[in-house]
Amino acid sequence: MSDWGDLVARVRGLSTHLLGAGQLRAIAGSGGLAQLSAAIAQAGVIPAPLERAGVRLLEQGIRRHAARQLHLVWRWAGDRTSRLAPLVEDEDRRSIRAMLRGAASGTPPEARLAGLVATPSLPERALLELARRGDVASVASQLAAMGCPYASAILEEASRQYPDLLRLECALNTRFAARATAAAARADAPMRAHVSSVLDVENCWTARLLPVNGSPADVADYFVEGGAELSRDRWLAAATAPTVVAREAILQQTAASPWLRAAAAGTARVEDAVLQATIAHQHGLARQDPLGTAPIIEYVLRLRAEVRALQRMAWSVSLRVPAAAIAQALEPVP
């Protein structure tokens, strides 16, 4: 018998406060940051319109709202949080990856925070501190000082004179796979399948980033176990393909699920496409098994999608992108 029923009921209540596609399009019609701030406040995302509607303050308000919602879910989950850990740790993994990429490229601190969701394990203040780090070694050191379980996975590579960013990201994925797979095993089938799908997508993206025509020995360490759709053999065939075209053909022929097809297509805004395909799948699962973890997974993913949409809107309005173009660029939200 499921022990998720009470939490699912509460999460469904929270879901009614998520912004739908129509609401997002209406908000996108705001003519300036002050109007956008007022519209977002009216939607209940921030407490009140900002007196000085700067894009960074608006972004921060959006991020803090998502963090509060996620904190509620965690508080209600009680001793079940360990079985829901893959959801939070996936957000943490994405945040750490953004910090490593930002530090490696010298991206301004505020830009590193774009689209991220603060969690109980990496709250807002931790993200702000990580975003200020000047290189990948100091990001890893700061994570270690915070007691983050992902720090030890990246410390060695991050400490090299010229750290390999792809190796760092694969180390993060490997640590996530071990922790999330163990946690999902104590949850239910939707959570186990979700973790596998995340790992399949990450393996697909890794294969696309590797140099073509590599040898199996050169690329084997980049594969992360735990996926269900992209096997090691198929991944190796793609990763060692002689041309980009051959690699993409192998990945696209292998992909059966909508999210992996989106990842393999490699089109513009591929992360949005993968996220929306995953949300749609979880929505279907939630109807089939309304008392399992699928409604909770769907909610957390929709919360991420909302953060990404609103923050993208804030930056677009600040850059005076026409309202029609902003609305057209919004990814579909169920």
Image (cartoon, rainbow, N blue to C red):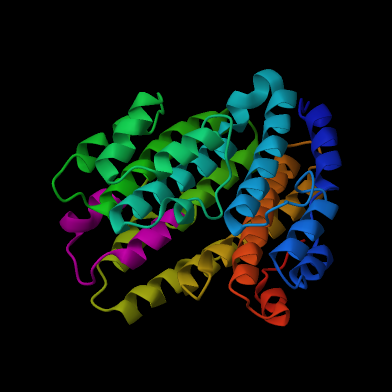
Tell me residue 161's x, y (percent).
13, 46
For the residue pair 49 and 81, the one nearer the viewer reads as 49
Compared to 79, does 115 lie above or below? below
Left or right, 306 with respect to 160, comes to right
Q: Which residues are magenta?
A: 202-223
Rendered residue at 34%/42% (across/down): 133
For the residue pair 247 and 298, the one nearer the viewer reads as 298
User: Does the magenta run of residues contain 149?
Assistant: no
Compared to 159, does 263 lie above or below? below
Tell me residue 326's x, y (percent).
67, 75
Q: Residue furthest top?
A: 79
From where the camera sits, is residue 258 visible?
no
Tell me residue 96's x, y (percent).
42, 43
What is the number of callouts on the image?
0
Tell me residue 70's x, y (percent).
68, 36
Rendered residue at 68%/28% (across/down): 74
